[in-house]
Amino acid sequence: MFFAEVIVRKSAIASLVYFLAMVLPERKSDPPGVYEKPFKEMYDYIVVGAGSAGSVVATRLSEDYDTSVLLLEAGMSDLEPDDVTQIPSLWGSLIGSEKDWGYHSVQQKYSHFAYENERAYIAQGKVLGGSSSINAQNIVRGSRKNYDQWEHEGAVSWGYDDVLPFFRKLENASDTSYGDSSMIYFYS
Ligand SMILES: Cc1cc2nc3c(=O)[nH]c(=O)nc-3n(C[C@H](O)[C@H](O)[C@H](O)COP(=O)(O)OP(=O)(O)OC[C@H]3O[C@@H](n4cnc5c(N)ncnc54)[C@H](O)[C@@H]3O)c2cc1C
């Protein structure tokens, strides 16, 4: 009896919500004052863009439990079960999709002659994860020689031995046959 009453009440509420959704005008944006305080008073940090960089920055900042972080993303979620971003080999199909900002360069003078109006297409992720959600997932650590050259030219602490621990921290290669390429020199 109690169970049936709950079902009846729930369906009455659902009908009311449905009715209101049909008759009330669609609200385009939240009215001012919907939040108790301005965002900048509610959060210690506001990170704009949940792409490769923004996501890492927000994660690292939020490791401190006393710190509040708001991460804002203009694009959609990447968590739907049928989301193509979950299948790395299909990255190419995401170019030009709703998860791509689909930018174009200005007209080029000396290149892109095969393109319409000599404007390059510039894919950029518009989704949680940003461009890392639509990219090809190739990883190249970079050449020791380049980093050491930059340090030699004045970029203190950007030598290969300085950055190598950070490469190792983010790498997760489970195939040990790749070995550790940290000692390999590439000459161009
Ligand atoms: C098609 C493609 C293939 C690639 N392949 C590779 C590869 O194989 N290997 C590799 O190493 N790199 C690859 N890259 C490059 C790599 O993905 C990018 O260099 C990297 O993801 C850039 O990180 P980011 O944080 O600078 O920007 P993004 O990851 O692009 O993040 C920017 C985020 O900010 C959001 N944003 C923008 N404006 C606003 C706003 N006003 N408010 C809120 N949010 C906003 C965007 O929606 C996006 O989510 C590829 C890139 C593309 C596009």
Image (spheres, rainbow, N blue to C red):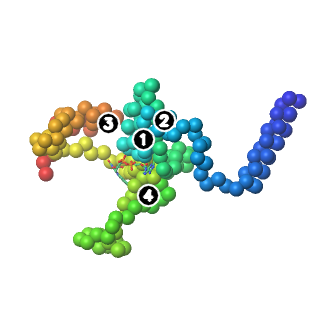
Among the two numbered marks 2 and 1 on one chain, the one whose residue lies closer to the N terminus? 2
Looking at the rendered structure, the kind of residue marked 2 is Glu
Position above or below: 22 against 113: above
The residue that appears at 50% across and 34% down in the rendered structure is 42
What kind of element bears circle 2? helix
Residue under pointer 4? 101
Among the two numbered marks 2 and 4 on one chain, the one whose residue lies closer to the N terminus? 2
Looking at the rendered structure, the kind of residue marked 4 is Trp
In this view, the residue in front, 30 or 76, is: 30
The N terminus - image quarter = top right
The residue that appears at 47% across and 46% down in the rendered structure is 73
Tell which tag, 4 or 1, sits nearer the viewer: 1
Bin the neighbour count of mark 2 within 10 Å (Cα to Cα): few under 14, some 14-19, many 20 and up: few
Tell me if residue 158 can be seen.
yes
**Disc 4 within 8 angstroms of ligand 1 (CB):** yes
The reply to whether dot 2 and dot 1 touch (C-beta < 8 Å) is no
In this view, the residue in front, 21 or 178, is: 21
In this view, the residue in front, 99 or 87, is: 99
Among the two numbered marks 3 and 2 on one chain, the one whose residue lies closer to the N terminus? 2
The residue that appears at 36% across and 73% down in the rendered structure is 116
Q: CA distance from mark 3 to mark 1?
A: 24 Å
Residue under pointer 1? 47
In the rendering, which numbered label is found on residue 171? 3
Q: CA distance from mark 4 to mark 1?
A: 19 Å
Tell me if residue 129 can be seen.
no
Among the two numbered marks 4 and 1 on one chain, the one whose residue lies closer to the N terminus? 1
Looking at the rendered structure, the kind of residue marked 3 is Glu
Tell which tag, 3 or 2, sits nearer the viewer: 2
Q: CA distance from mark 2 to mark 1?
A: 14 Å
Bin the neighbour count of mark 1 within 10 Å (Cα to Cα): few under 14, some 14-19, many 20 and up: some
Looking at the rendered structure, the kind of residue marked 1 is Val
Q: CA distance from mark 3 to mark 4?
A: 28 Å
